[in-house]
Image (cartoon, helix red, strand yellow):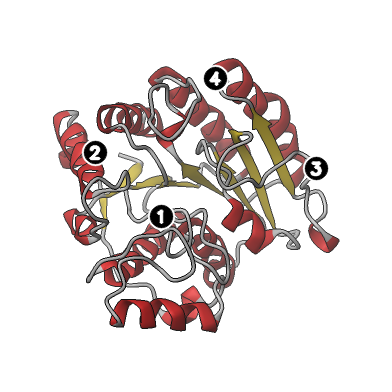
């Protein structure tokens, strides 16, 4: 198959406490669904690895890395920077999430596969350069974009984020950078309160951020419409050499942390749009990274639809 899968039960070692929505049971639901669907056995696999300090520093500050290490060593139950629970092995798992995504980038840009889906946790798109928040420790997709540029010589990266929450951390990291285009559809107003349409980048990065905020109740017409009518022409002008997806499935109907109404078929359509862009500009090179999704059954079904569309 031309699509690789990063799936490892070690990501369940990140413990968030009883009743927390970003819990290991999310991962178990994905594992069961992908095994039942035949993906686990059929797909080539990407292995986790710990991200190295210099790879993290491409997007995060030295001071923030010190905070994470200190908070972990002191046994805190939450990062001191914000609303992100941590346990005894959370730092270890977060490093393996970021590093695993980098292995997926290597596989795609090395030509062994055309695309990859990275089922990792903790998620990443809320983590800014200097702050963990919103259940996120390291910004996996941002680190992947910078890694692709520095190791593989990729000049232009497109990041598309369909999580119900705005990827404020990703936007913040690349807001003044014309080499990374950030596109987001998200519920508005909603956590974390960023992402109005007027936020379009600054300085050299002006025009390489495109936010599409929508009210609660929005679904296929609004979100797929934005991908077709706004992202597609923007991507055609930008001409990315690699596409990354922040694949948050809390935009699915019935998710407890969102009020969007996307269905599994809608996620397949969004995936097909991104594949069309990847085929047009990137020789099909695309890496999708798991973000949110907190209904166990909904997450499992949406991930399955997304992966089936990727692997077609």
| Vertical comparison of 64 with 49: above or below | below
Lower position in the chain sequence, tag 1 or tag 4 = 1
**Residue 230 x %, y %:** 72, 30
Quadrant hosting residue 152? bottom right
Label 2 sits on a secondary structure element that is: helix
Q: How crowded is mark 4: few (under 14 residues within 10 Å), some or many (20 or more)?
A: many
Residue annotated with mark 4: 219
Q: Which residue sits furthest top?
A: 221
Which circle marks residue 135 in the picture?
1
Say if mark 4 contacts mark 2, CB within 8 Å: no
Mark nearer the viewer, 1 or 4: 1
Distance from Cα at disc 4 to Cα at disc 3:
22 Å
Q: Residue at x 72, y 59 (%)?
A: 175
**Residue 270 x %, y %:** 52, 28
Distance from Cα at disc 1 to Cα at disc 3:
26 Å
Q: Residue at x 51, y 41 (%)?
A: 284
Residue annotated with mark 2: 30
Residue annotated with mark 3: 198
Lower position in the chain sequence, tag 1 or tag 3 = 1
């Amino acid at each position: 198959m031309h699509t690789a899968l990063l799936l490892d039960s070690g990501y369940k070692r990140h413990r968030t406490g009883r009743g927390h929505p970003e819990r290991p049971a999310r991962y178990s639901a994905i594992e069961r669904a992908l095994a039942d669907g035949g993906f686990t056995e059929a797909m080539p696999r990407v292995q986790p690895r710990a991200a190295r300090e210099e790879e993290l520093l491409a997007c995060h500050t030295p001071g923030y890395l010190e905070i994470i290490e200190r908070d972990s060593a002191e046994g805190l139950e939450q990062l001191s920077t914000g609303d992100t629970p941590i346990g005894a092995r959370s730092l270890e798992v977060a490093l393996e999430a970021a590093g695993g995504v980098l292995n997926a980038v290597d596989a795609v840009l090395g030509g062994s596969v055309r695309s990859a889906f990275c089922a990792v946790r903790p998620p990443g798109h809320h983590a800014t350069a200097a702050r963990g928040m919103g259940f996120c420790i390291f910004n996996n997709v941002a680190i992947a974009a910078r890694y692709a540029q520095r190791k593989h010589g990729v000049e232009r990266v497109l990041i598309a984020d369909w999580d119900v929450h705005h990827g404020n951390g990703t936007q913040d990291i690349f807001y003044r950078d014309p080499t990374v285009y950030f596109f987001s559809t998200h519920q508005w107003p909603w956590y974390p309160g960023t992402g109005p349409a007027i936020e379009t980048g600054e300085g050299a990065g002006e025009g390489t951020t495109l936010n599409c905020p929508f009210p609660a109740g929005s679904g296929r017409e609004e979100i797929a419409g934005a991908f077709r009518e706004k992202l597609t022409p923007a991507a055609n002008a930008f001409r990315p050499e690699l596409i990354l997806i922040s694949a948050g499935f809390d935009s699915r109907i019935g998710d407890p942390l969102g009020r969007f109404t996307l269905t599994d078929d809608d996620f397949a359509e969004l995936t097909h749009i991104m594949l069309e862009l990847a085929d047009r500009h990137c020789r099909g090179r695309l890496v999708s990274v798991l973000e949110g999704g907190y209904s166990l059954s909904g997450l499992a079904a949406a991930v399955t639809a997304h992966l089936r569309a990727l692997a077609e």
